[in-house]
Image (cartoon, rainbow, N blue to C red):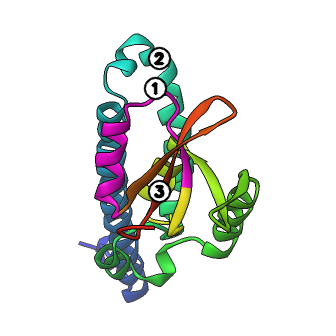
Amino acid sequence: MNQDDVFKITSEEISSLIKDNKSWIVNKDWDMYIFTKKGNYISDRKMTIGLEYEYNSAMWDEIFLREWMVMEERLSAGLGVEQEVLTKFGDGFFKSQDELLEEVRELTNQLETMTYKERQVTIYTYEDFNMLSNQGIFRDPYFILDLQRKWKKKISDHLGMYGYTIIETLHIGGEKYVFVSKEESD
């Protein structure tokens, strides 16, 4: 056998293969994390909407997909990702959060506000509250919520999961809203 026929590999090639393999494993782990999050999110949304989903599932599926695309972008920046997952993947894995945080600020600045009980209060739709809460970036201690024809009891239970309580029912422009707070009483 000729020496030229012997398989040779350099230490640089070995290092490159190991690095590529680690990167592949990390990306596969992230893909599984995103896949699981998406499944949980869509299941939760269907359960929250209830029978209304069955009446127009194509419309709701489209809405869920649009919401999920925004959520996935934020998760890719590490927003709303559990601390243990952030630690596992490391700082260098996630995209820059600055642009996404600015986008969230712009979104919330565009929302309607009103003065209520001498406070400037943001009015959220239930869909916006749900999306921001699921991403772990909802921070308002009190706000007004547009129920969007949803059952008040179901929304009350969902708000309770995030530590919020409905304080008062309001009628604004002929529509039903609720004042919500983290505080026990107001």
Which structural element holds mark 3? strand
- Residue 157 badge: none
Residue 127: give x, y in percent of width and height: 51, 41
Which is nearer the eye, 124 or 42? 124
Which structural element holds mark 2? helix
Residue at figure coordinates x 33%, y 36% from the top left: 48
Q: How far, Cα to Cα, is label 2 from label 3?
A: 31 Å
First to last magenta residue range: 144-163
Do tag 2 and tag 1 residues touch (Cβ < 8 Å)? yes
Q: Residue beneath label 1, please?
A: 61
Taking the image as shown, residue 162 lies to the left or right of residue 180, namely: left
Residue 18: give x, y in percent of width and height: 33, 77
- Residue 180 badge: 3
- Residue 58 badge: 2
Which structural element holds mark 1? helix
Residue 5: give x, y in percent of width and height: 32, 70
Residue at figure coordinates x 64%, y 70% from the top left: 101
Tell which tag, 1 or 3, sits nearer the viewer: 3
| Tally of numbered discs | 3
Q: How far, Cα to Cα, is label 1 from label 3?
A: 28 Å
Tell which tag, 2 or 3, sits nearer the viewer: 3
Taking the image as shown, residue 142 lies to the left or right of residue 105, namely: left
